[in-house]
Amino acid sequence: MTDNDTHDRVETDGGTASPAQAHQQTDYLNEEVNLLKPSTAFMRDHLRVVWTSFVIWALIVFGPVTLTAVAPGPMTQTMPLLGFPLHYFLVAFGAPTGALILAAVYARKRDALDEKYGIDHTTPEAGGDAGGDAGDATATDGGVEQ
C-alpha cells in the first residue's frame, strides 16, 4: 500500500515537515496528476490559485456581455463623463485592464507559493563550475557540446 498523501510527512524528530521540506521530498514523477483532486500540497495550493484566477477572469471577460444581454437598458446608456455606453467601456477598457491586473496578482501569488515550498528558479551560470565541467554539457540534439 502506497502513501500518496505527502503533505503530512513526519520528520525523524517527531515534527511535521514544513511545506518546503515536503515539496523537496516529493517525487513528482510518481505522483498522480489530477486537476480535480491534486495529490500534493503544492499542487492543491497552485490549483486553488489557478481556479480562482480562472473564475475571476471569466467574470471580467464575460460579465459585461452577459449583463448587456440580461439588462440592456442600463448597460447601453451613455456614461455622462466619458460619453461611451457602459458595456462598451467595460469590454474595451475593463476586460483588458482586469486581465492585466489578474496576471500581476497571479505572478505575486505564484512567487509566494514558490517561496513557501522552497522552489528556486535560479539556474547555474552557463560555463560556470557548478559541480560539472562545461565541456560535458549536452547539446539539444543529444550529442555532447564541443
Image: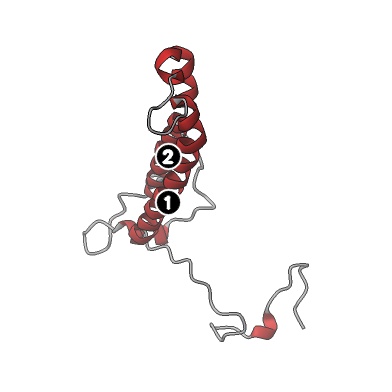
Residue position marked by numbered label 2 in the rendering: 53
Amino acid at pointer 2: Ser
Q: In front: 42, or 31?
A: 42
Residue 137 in picture, x, y percent from top left: 68, 78
Label 1 SS? helix
Mark 1 lies on residue: 104
Against 68, residue 100 (above or below) is: below
Q: Amino acid at mark 1?
A: Ala
Where's residue 27, x and y in %? 48, 56
Q: Is residue 2 visible?
A: no
Image quadrant where one finds the N terminus: top left
Q: Are marks 1 and 2 in contact (CB under 8 Å)?
A: no
Q: Residue at x 45, y 14 (%)?
A: 72
Q: Secondary structure at mark 2?
A: helix
* Residue displayed at 70% across by 74% down: 138
Instruction: Pick the residue in front: 9 or 137.
Output: 137
Residue 54's disc is none
116 left or right of 72 in image: left
